[in-house]
Every structure is written in structure tokens, then in C-alpha cells.
Image: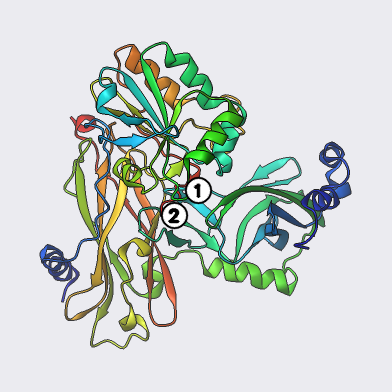
Amino acid sequence: MKTLNPLVLGALLLGPDLATAQDDPVATLAATTEGAFDDEGARVVTTLISGSVSDSGDRLQVGVVFDIDPEWHIYWKNPGQTGLSTAVTFTAGGETSGVELWPAPSVFQTDDGFITSFGYEGQVLLSGSVLVPAGADEVHVTAAADYLVCDSTCIPGRNEMQLVAPVATRAESEAESAFAVAEAAVPVDASELGWSIILPVIPGPLLPGESVEVLIALDTGPESEELPSAGMLRPDEPARMIAYERIEQVTVEPLMASHTPEGRRGVLLTLRLTAGADPVAEDQLFSGVFLVSDRTTRRALRIEFPIPRNHTETE
Amino acid sequence: MSIQRFLSAACVLLAAPAVLHAQDATAVVGEAAPGFSLQDESGATHTLAQYEGQVVVLEWTNPECPYVVRHYDVDTMENLATTYGGQDVVWLAVNSSHFNTADDVTAWKSAEGFEYSTLLDVDGSVGHAYGARTTPHMFVVAADGTLAYAGAIDDNPRGNNDDATNYVDGAVAALIAGDSPSPSSTDPYGCSVKYE
């Protein structure tokens, strides 16, 4: 496929007339489509898949599998300091919805560490759900994926797909396992692993232009306890251990990562939060993913804590 | 060891001397903008100091980036530079791509038909000083040399917002009116700057 002329390929996938395709989406779109073309062909191939219906019977799990060329990556819901977040719009029965489950991203950095971004390489499934009309045994689903794929250059892509999905309590096994892999990669609370995360108690308030250093501690227990793999937790480069959602007027710098002190097992990460020139909104949260690894596994832990309130807002 | 004792132990560890991987000091809105001396595509030298008393817009650019191309296709930068050019506003593009050359910049300028100069920051030092991370990434320096705005050109990263707000337009207009830009910083979007 890589040798096909992109224009010809585009015509094959979208049909001879895009306007016709939009008027009658069932007619021409395929479940798999290619996008982000350069001289080497498509850099991203996407496939719309459906999973199982919810227990209540009114939602159907759907998702888009992104197959990304080696060395290239797309972006998480917060792309970081560069890039563009990936967006998927699912449409069924006149209702549109977006991505609900975001697998933990990888952290990408330029060689000099100056530019950090969050995203996915290889393969990732971004999933959501669509409404199932009462009594329906199949649902017409369309999906549009908007993304930016980058290696040393960047190509924006928009892939449109469609599928007639059966409403079943159990999807076909290939889709079932794809959803299971994606769900397993979604960040979890540390408590689900029997661990605890000690989040910063920030004395605050953070004034415009001020910085505060916060310490996030992952504690897996005393060393005497039998905790398979937890004792092997290792700190990587601090910048590679944290991904976070955008926070208006606050910049985040990972400063230091290390093991916990003697007698405990865990990992510490220090972040510096710096307020911008404009006031920081009162109700903002730091919402992120703490990425720690042991010899064989990378764990993605959900963390959230309030950003200190601005002085002028509290008085 | 209790959780509390663990945390206090952790804090002691934090306070101990350690290798910090702090990022390079970069430009901060509200403080003096980093000075520079760079040559443009014709070989002429530009310094920030020489434009004291004028508003200076710095536009990080890379003609190979699709986001830059999208804005040049609709003359976003050229229109603003022309609009404010008669009002004591200096518009300068800056190219920090390690592979950029005066010839390439001249060809791009001629193809796009804009008038302003492009500064060649091949070693990336000015880009690092400003914290330029994307193309486009916009910085607006007030007449007194204070960095007044840093961030995106607009709120339309996907190019599908028919009612987009151009932040640089707003920032420059505010400075001309004697006000402070609001917002003064936004998240830039686009390709990463291609530093060496």
C-alpha cells in the first residue's frame, strides 16, 4: 500500500465524490482507512472497531485502532509542549461522542530535553461509546480521527471510517482483546495495586510568577513485606515519569526522581509548578499520570491534587 | 514507619543536595525579554535593543511545518504585520531549525510574498532563551522591552474554528492602546522547533 499514489488511494477509500460520501455515509467509507501521507505513503492506518454493549444495553463500546509507522508518534489528550491532541468523533444515531478511555501515554523528549510531549507510538486504541437505539440489533457508527503524526517532521491527518456494528454482549475475540489491552493500559489508582501515593500538601497560595516545588511519593510498603516486583521499582529520568493535563497559567517542570528513603519501597518525584503572569483559577487540579517502571512492567498511576489558589482570589 | 514519617523522611531526602534537572531559564512574561543579535536572510543584523520604543513581534517559523504553511496560505502573519506595520510595530520571523539557510528563507519569502525579515537562529540559542517550542510560537515584546505575550497565534489549532480569536492581534492592539494583553500567555501549538 505504501507505493500507491496518495491521490488514488484517497479516492479508493473515500469514494469518487466526498460530498456523496457525506450524504450517504453507508455507501463508501471503510472501517479501515489510511492517512498522513508523505513520499513513503500513509504514516497512520486507522481501524474502527466495536466491542460489547453495556450492561444497561444502551451504550456500545467503539474505538479506533491507530497503527503508526515506526519512529512516528501521535499525541495524548494533552500533547505537551508541542504537537496537537488526537481527537476522535464517534457518530451514531445522530449523537456524537469522543474518546473516553485514554491509555497511559509515553513521554517523548527531543535529544536536548528541551521539548517534552506526550503521546503514542506503535499501536494504540482510543475508545468511547455510542448510543444504542432501543431494540436495535445493529448500529451504524462513523468515526473521524483528527491527529498530528510526527517524527522529525509532522503531518496532520484526518481519517474517516464507518462500521455497521452488531449489538452483542460480547464482541468478536480480536476486538475483545484489543479493548482489554487498551483498558489495561489506562492509568489506575495506586490503591488498586495495594500501593499508596502521598500527594503534596501545598501551603500555597501561588501568586502570579511564583513557583512551588511539590513532592509526589509512591509508597509500596516496608521493605520487609513480600511485594513481588514492587521492590524493583526504579526512577527513570524525572521528565519521563509524568504526563499531565493542561493547567491554565501553570507550567510544570519535573525536577528530580529518586528511590524512597531506606526502609520503604517506592519512588519519589519532585515537580516545580510555576504560575504565569495572569491569575491562576481557584478550582484547578493537577491531573496527571505517574509513570513508574520495574524490570518488566511500566505502571501508570492516576494522580490528582489541587493547584494552590491565587492569593488575590482568596482575600 | 508511618506514612507521615515516610513523608517527612522523603522531604529530608528532597532537601539534601541532589542533581537537579531544571530546564534552561527561559523568557518570562512580565519580565525583560531576552536580548539578541541575529542576522536575517540578507545578512543584516537585528538586535532587540535597536527596536526599543517599538512593539516587537517575534514569530517562530519553519516553512516545512504544516501549521506554518496553513497560516501562510491564508496570510495570517502577513496581514497582521501589514496592519500594524504603520503603527510602530516591528514584525520579525525567527527560524531556529538547525538546517535552515539564508537561501531557503529567501526563497520562502519570495514565494509567500511577505516583507518582514526572518532571523536565522541556526544554533537555537535565541529559541532556547525565549523557550520557543513550536512553530508557530509567538512572542510580543512591549515598547519598554518587557515580554508582554507568549504563546499561540490563535485559539484555532485544528483550523476548524470559524470564530477564532487571534491572540497576537489582541496583544499588539492592547499594547498600542496602553493596556496589558489578556491573555498574556497561552499554550502554543504546532510542530516542534527543529533544534540541532
Is A95 situated above or below A50? above
Q: Which residue is mark 2?
A: A117
> Quadrant location of residue A4?
bottom right
Q: Chain of mark 2?
A: A
Q: Is residue A157 left or right of residue B90?
A: right
Q: Is residue B123 left or right of residue A262?
A: right
Q: Which residue is mark 1?
A: A83
Front residue of A48 and A97: A48
Is A9 situated above or below B3? above
Measured as percent of width and height from the top left, residue A8 is found at 84, 51
Measured as percent of width and height from the top left, residue B31 is found at 22, 32
Q: Could you give the CA–CA distance between mark 2 and mark 1, rounded to whole angstroms? A: 7 Å
Are dots 2 and 1 in contact, CB under 8 Å?
yes
The first of marks 2 and 1 along the sequence is: 1
Q: Is residue A144 visible?
A: no
Quarter of the image with the N terminus of chain A in it: bottom right
Pointer 2 local density, CA inside 10 Å: few below 14, some 14–19, many at least 20: many
Measured as percent of width and height from the top left, residue B68 is found at 54, 37
Front residue of B76 and B113: B113
Q: Tell me which residue sits at (40%, 46%) in the image.
A: B122
Give the residue type that dot 1 points to. Answer: Gly
Quarter of the image with the C terminus of chain A in it: top left
Give the residue type that dot 2 points to. Answer: Ser
Q: Tell me which residue sits at (41%, 51%) in the image.
A: B195
Front residue of B119 and A285: B119
